[in-house]
Image: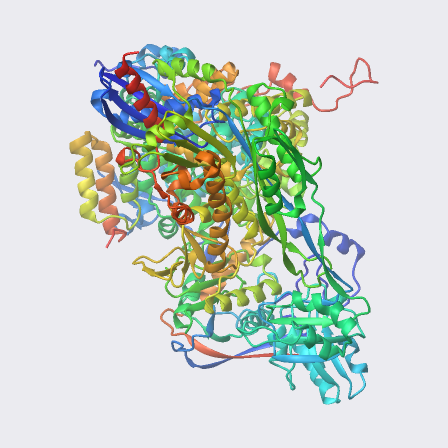
Amino acid sequence: MTDTVAGARTLELREKGPAMPGRRSDEVVVGLSPAFGDFFSKTIVGVPHADVLRELLAGVEEQGMHARVVRFRASADLAAIAHAAARLSGSGIGVGILSRGTTMIHQKDLLRLSNLELFPQAPLLDLETFRLIGRNAARYAKGESPEPVPSRNDHMARPRWQAKAALLHIKETEFVRPGAEPVELDVLIRTAG
Amino acid sequence: MAPEELDPRRDYPLASRRPELIRTPTGKPLDDITIEAVLSGAVTADDLRITPRTLQLQAQIAESTGRRQLGQNLRRAAELTALPDEKVLAVYNALRPRAATKDELLRIADELERDYAATLCARLVREAADVYERRDILAR
Amino acid sequence: MTIQSAPGHQTPAARPRSRRTELLEQRPVNLDGFVEEWPEVGMVAMDSPYDPKGGIRLENGTVVEMDGKAREDFDFLDRFIADHAIDAAAAVRAMALSPTEIAHLLVDPKVSRQEVLSVSCGLTPARLLEVVRTMNVVEMMMALQKMRARRTPANQAHSTSARDNPVQVAADAAEAGLRGFRELETTLGVVRYAPLVAIALQVGAQSGRPGVLTQCALEEATELELGMRGITGYAETISVYGTEQVFCDGDDTPWSKAFLASAYASRGIKMRFTSGTGSEVQMGNAEGKSMLYLEIRCILVAKGAGVQGLQNGSISCIGVPGAVPAGIRAVLAENLIASTVDLECASGNDQSFSHSDMRRTARLMPQLLPGTDFICSGFSAVPNYDNMFAGSNLDPEDFDDWNVIQRDLQVDGALRHVPEAEILAARDRAARALQGVFAYLGLAPISDKEIEAVTYAHGSKELPPRDVLEDLKSAQSVMDRGITGLDIVKGLDASGFPDVAEALLGVLRQRVSGDLLHTSAILTPELTTLSAVNDANDYAGPGTGYRPSGARWEEMKRLRHVVSARNPEQEVDR
Amino acid sequence: MGLVVGVDIGNSTTEACAADVAADGTVIYLAAALGRTTGVKGTTENVAGVADVVRRALAAAGPVAGRDPAGLHAVLVNEATPVISGLAMETISETIITESTMIGHNPDTPGGVGLGVGTTVAFSDLPACAPGGEVVCVVGAGVDFEDAAAGINAATARGVHVTGVIVRADDANLIANRLDRPAPVVDEVTLVDRVPLGMRAAVEVAEAGRTIKTLSDCYGIATVFRLDPEQTRMIAPVARALVGNRSAVVVRTPAGDVTGRRIPAGTLSLIGETVKRTVEVDAGADEIMAALRRVRPLADAVGEPGTHVGGMLARVRDTMARLTATPADAVRIQDVLAADTFVPQRVTGGLAGEFALENAVALAAMVRTTRGPMELLAARLRAELGADVLIGGVEADMALLGALTTPGAGLPLAILDLGGGSTDAALATGDGLVRSVHLAGAGDLVTSLIDSELGLDDLALAEDIKRSPLAKAESFFHLRMEDGTVRFFREPLPADAFARVVVLGDTGLRPIPTRHTVEKIRQVRRSAKRRVFVVNALRALEQVAPGGAVRNIGFVVVLGGSALDFEIPDMIAEALAEFGIVSGTGNVRGAQGPRNAVATGLVASHAATRARGD
C-alpha cells in the first residue's frame, strides 16, 4: 500500500444492515462490487476509490438528489450489480461500479444485459468523468434527458491494460459470496491531515 | 450421372482444368458468363451460384487430398443449396444455445431430411439436440 | 503493493534516482502492460501445471476417454473434437508417440508435411500442447515454414474509414491491392453504411489489381447477405471460443458454427473461423486452463467443422498473452498448430500490440520469417485513427520498413514497393470507377473534388465530408433494390472501366466453380486459383520450398531510395 | 389489348402505373410501383430507377401481364425537365457583451436562493477581506467544493458578508449545501477568470421552476446599483437579455453593455422582366418577398459574391448549366423563397458560453429548364427495357388528369404538388387551358429550418422530425405522445430512448439527443412547415388563379410526397378554408392516395388518344 499522502482522502465504509428497496423517488443507488474500497483501494489506473465515490456522490448531490450506497457481494458482474442497484432504488435508477473502475448506469425495467450508459474503458475514466456519471444518473432519476457522458477511446489502452484488467476481474471474482444479500453502507470520506 | 473420378493434381482448379464439368444452376457452362451476356441479361444473379453437383465434385477433391472434414462440410453445403436463404438462417438461429427445445431441433432435422433430402445436415442437427440436452443448453 | 511507477507519474518520496533509470522509464516499451502469471485462473500462456495430460482411449472407433476425461464427462467442445476433429483410425498410432518424437517430426525437414499430417490428425488437444511445449520459437518457425498449407505466402489488409467514406475505402483498397495484399477486410462505424462501403471496397480492390478478395465484418445475417449478393467475396469474423461458457456467451456452439460453415459453402463463398489465446481468461472463464490449451480446442473445433481455415494469433485479446511470460511464443504456437492440422492460417499481427516499435517488429518476426498463408490478418492500410478494427500491429507508415526488411532478409512478406505515380493513378482510377458505379446505380454522387482529394490524401481528415443523409438513403436503396455484384459489373462497364468489370466478373465466376472453397485459396492477379491443392507447400529443407527468386526477387529489391551503381550520383528509377 | 406503363420521373421518386388499354380507350389499371429517382430528374441517370419501377409494376401486375415483357406495348414517360434547387442561410444578427458585464447562461443547477450584492473578490483573496464588507466570491478552476465552502465559512465567521458566489465548476449546490450562511451561487462560468474583480456585482438565483425578478428588470438593477435615469437607460439591454433566466450575475463596470448588431449579409438582386430590385438580405424574409412580388415575373436572381446566398445561386446555376450543357449565364433562377429563421449562436464576450438565438434568413432557389435530354433518355430506356418508349404530355397536364380521378374532385381544379425541392401548382378550368407555376422551397427547406433552429447539425434526424410525430419515453413501458395521449408497450422500449424525446418514424423510435422539450420541437416543426408550405401554397395558387384571385379556384388537390405528411395537408386546408376552397389530399383512382397522379394521367391521356384513333 502506498503511504498516505497528506491531503489524500481515506474511505471508510460501515455496514448498516441489509439494503431494502427505497421509497424516495429522489434517490439514486450506487452499487459497489465485492472488493471496492475493501481489498482494492484504487482503480486500474490508480484513481483512489475514496475520490471516485466522492465524485459520484457529488454529481448526484449537485442535481439536488439523494444517493444511497450499497455493497453487492453476490456477483462481480457489472450489469448484475448495476441492475440490482437500480431495483433497490426508489427512482429506479442505479449506478454500478467495479473495483477496476468500470461503471454502468442502469434502470430497473431494463433487461439486465442492457443499460442506460456503460463506461467500459476503465483506464480512461478520471474523476471528472465520475462526476458526470453521478450527474447523469441523477438527471435520469429526475426524468430529464441528459446527453450521454462523452465516451473516449484509445487503441493503445489494449496493450497497456488488457491483461491487468483481466487480473483485477478474476481477483474481484474471488470475493464473490454467492447468494449474499446486499448491504447498505455508511460512507465516510476523510482528508488525511 | 456417372461419378466422375477426379485427380486433384490434374483436374484442379476445375474452372480452368475441367470447365466442362461445371454448370450454373440454370444449366449454362462457365464460358457463357461473359460481360456481353451480363449486359444483355442472358446471365443473371441466379447463374452465379454453385450447384450441388459442383460441390460434390469439390468434396471429392478435398477428400482425395486428405481433407475429410472439409469434404463433409462441402457435402453438407451441397444439401443446403436447396434451402432458401431465410430457411438457412432460421436453422442456424435454432442451433444457437438455449434457442430451441429438443423437439424443435428434432422437427427441424426431420424437415431437412424429408423436404430437402439433407441427411447429413439432419444428422448434425440431431447430434446437436443430443449434446445440448446432456449439457443443458436447450431452450426451456 | 509496490509503488506505482508509470512514466509521467511522480512518486511521492523524492529519492535520488539514476539518470539511466529515468531514461529507461521514458522508453515506449514501459507503456505496455505486463503481469505476473497466475496459472490457477488461466493467466498463463502455455506452461501450466493444471492443463490435462494427453491421452486417448477408443472403443469400437469411438473416443471414450480423452486427455484424462471420460466421455460421459465431456463438455461440448470435448465431444465435438472427439467425434469430428480426431481421426480415430490414426489416433492410436499417433498418441503412442511421445511429444518430443512428434516435435521432431515437425522440425525435421526430411519428414514431409504429409507424414506429419498423418500423425497430427490423430492428436488430442493436450497432446498437441505437450508437443509445442517441447519446442522453442526457432524450432516452431522451422516447423511453420514446412506446415504452412499454401506454398506461396500472402497478406491481408484493413481498409476502413473513420467517417465510413466510400471514396476513401475505394482508393485505399486500390492502393493496398497494388502493394500486394490479396485479401482486404473492412468494417463500419455506422452499420447502415455497410452496402456502400462494401461496394467501394470491391470496386477499389478490383481496380487496384484484379482478383483481390474482399470482406465486410458485420453481424452474421447481413454479412451473409452481402456475400450471397456478390458484393463481398469471403467471410472471416466467425468466432469460436475454448470453453463452453464463453462459447455460449458468444451465443453459439460448435454445431451452430459448423452449420454456418456449410451455409457459406452452399453459396460458393469462402470463409474461415476466428479465435485466439486470451479471450477466455479475459472474460474470467478459463476454467483454470492455459491460454494455449483453450486455443488448441478452438483450432480443433474449426478442424472438425470442416471449415478450410482459421484466423488466429490472439487477435483482439493480444494484450493478454502479450503481458505474460512466453505469451508471444504461445501466439506463434497457435499459428503453428492451425497449420499442423492442415488449416489455412491467417496469422494475426492485426491489432495494436505495443507502444514500442522494437517490440512490434519482434512480435511480427515469427510469422514473417517462416511465412504464413496471410502474415497479417489485417495490416492497416489506413491511418490508425481511420482503423475501425481498433488499430493494427502495422500501419501504412510501416510500408517502407516492411519492404526494407523483406529485402534485407530476402524473406517474402508478400508486399512490394510501388512508385508514387502508379499509386496516385490507381487511387484516382478507383475513385473514378466508384464515381461511375454510383452514378450508374443512381447512388449519392461523388464529386471530382472528392476524387482529387482522395488521390493525394493519407486519411479521412483530409477529405471533404460526404452528405451522410444522401449516403444512407443510397445504402438503403442498395438493399431495397436488391443490387448485386452483377449490377456493379454493369456499372463499371457502362462508365468506361471494362477491365475492372471483367476482373469483378472473374471473381464472381469463382463462386460457380467453388475452387476458392479449398484450403488457403487466393486468386492471382491473373484470376487463377492458388490453394493448398495446386500450390501445396513442398518445403523439405535447404534448397526446397518457396524462396523468393526471379521476377519476384527483382521486385523485392526495389525501394523508395536506392543509389544507382552505374551512376552513384543518381538513384535507381523508382 | 395493349399493356402500357405510365412512368412519372419526379425529383425524388419515380412512380409507375401499369394498365391495359383497349382499342376503344377503355383502361384497366393493373398495378402501381414506386422507387427512388436515380440521379437528377430528366437526365439519362434516371434509366436505372425507371427500369426498376417498370419491372416492379409489371411484376405486381401479375402473371397475365407480367410474364411476357415482349407483350409490353409501350412505356409512357412524362416530359421530365431537370429541376435544381438550392438552400442557403445567412445569420444576420449578433449579440455582444462588453466588459464582461453579465452572466446569463442559465446553468442547470444554481445553488441557494435570493439576491446578493457586493464587491467581487477572488476566492484566494477572501482571507484578506476586512470584516463588515459585502463581497461576491469568485471561485476559479481547481478549487474543490469542500475547500470553497470551508473558505467562505471561515470568512463569514470573521464577519465578512459573502452575499453571493460565482463558480467555475458545476458545484453550486455542493457549495450552497455546505454554507453556514445561505447565499445564491451561480456555477459553470467557464471563463470565470475574466470576471472583473473589485467591482460591484449582483448575484440572483430563483427557486426551481421560477425566474429571476430583480436583475431582469431595469429598475431592479437601478435599485441594486443606485443608478440615475441615464445610467438606467444604458443598463436596459442587460436586463432584457436576462429575462426568463433562473439565475444571473450582473457586474457594474464603467462601460459594460450588451448590444445587438446587424451583420451585413450582402444584397440580393431580383431581376424581373421589366424591373430590377436590389434588397439587403439582412432586411429579412418579408422585405425580400415583398421585393419579389414587385418584380414578378422573375427573370433571374443574383446574390452578392462571397455570401452564402451568392454562392448558392451560382452553384444552382452551374449545376444546371452542366446538366443541360448550357452556358451558365443562359441559366436563369426562376424563383426564390425567403424564410425568417434563427440559429443558436455563442454570444460574443460571454463568460459562460452563453447562447443567443440569432436571427437568420433562409433562402431557397430553383431553376428549371425546358430543355432536358429527354430524347436521349427515351433511347436509353428503349434499349434497357426492349419496349417502345413514348414521351407523354406536359407534367402539369398529366398531373391534373390524374388528380381528376380523385373521387369528389371537380373543375375548376388546382393541384398543389409538394415535393422535396420545389412546390408546383397547376390549374385546369375545363376550357383546355392549363396554367402552371413552379416555386422554390419545399420539403428540403423545412428540414433545413428544423435542423438549424434546433441546433441539431444532423439533417437525417431533422428529416425524421419533419416526417413523424414526437413523444417522450416517460418509462420503459409507455410513451407520452405529443398530443398528450399515452401509448403503452408490452416489451420494454430501447435503452437509448429512456427519458428522451423520441420521434416515431417508420422504422421505430429514434431518440433526439438534445435537451429540447416535446413542445419546443413540435413548435419549431410546425412553424417551419407553415413558413414553407402554407406560404408557398398561397403564393402558387395566387399565380395560377384566374385573375390572381384564389377565391376563383373551386377545388384544390394536394399531391406529391409531402402530401403524405401527417399535418401539412391539414395546415393547407385550414389556410385555404377562409377562401371557401375545397382542399384535401388527392386520392388518385380512388386508391393511390396522393401518389401516382402523373403516371395515371399519362395512361389516361394515352387511352384518350387511342380512342380518338390518332
Residue at figure coordinates x 60%, y 52% from the top left: D342
In percent of width and height, residue D453 lies at 56, 51
> C206 or D586, which lies in front?
D586
Vertical placement of residue D423 versus B51, above or below: below
Relative height, residue C555 to residue B68 (above, below): above
Residue C42 lies, in percent from the top left, at 46, 54
Position above or below: C398 against D513: above
The reply, left or right, for residue C394 in relation to residue C267 is right
D312 or C270: nearer the viewer: D312
Is residue D544 placed above or below A77 in the rendered structure?
above
Which residue, as the protein is rendered here, is positioned at the far right? C569
Q: Is residue C455 left or right of residue A56?
A: right
Q: Quadrant of residue D496?
A: bottom left
Q: Which quadrant is the C terminus of chain C positioned in?
A: top right
The N terminus of chain C is located in which quarter?
bottom right
Q: Residue at x 72, y 79 (%)?
A: D224
Colour convention of the picture: rainbow
Q: Give the x, y percent position of residue D405.
A: 29, 32
Q: Say left or right for C564 vs D459.
A: right
On the image, which quarter does residue C533 sit in?
A: top left
Q: Using the image as rendered, state which of residue C425 and residue C351 is in the foreground.
A: C425
Residue A169 at what x, y percent from top left? 49, 60
Closest to the observer, C454 or A187: C454
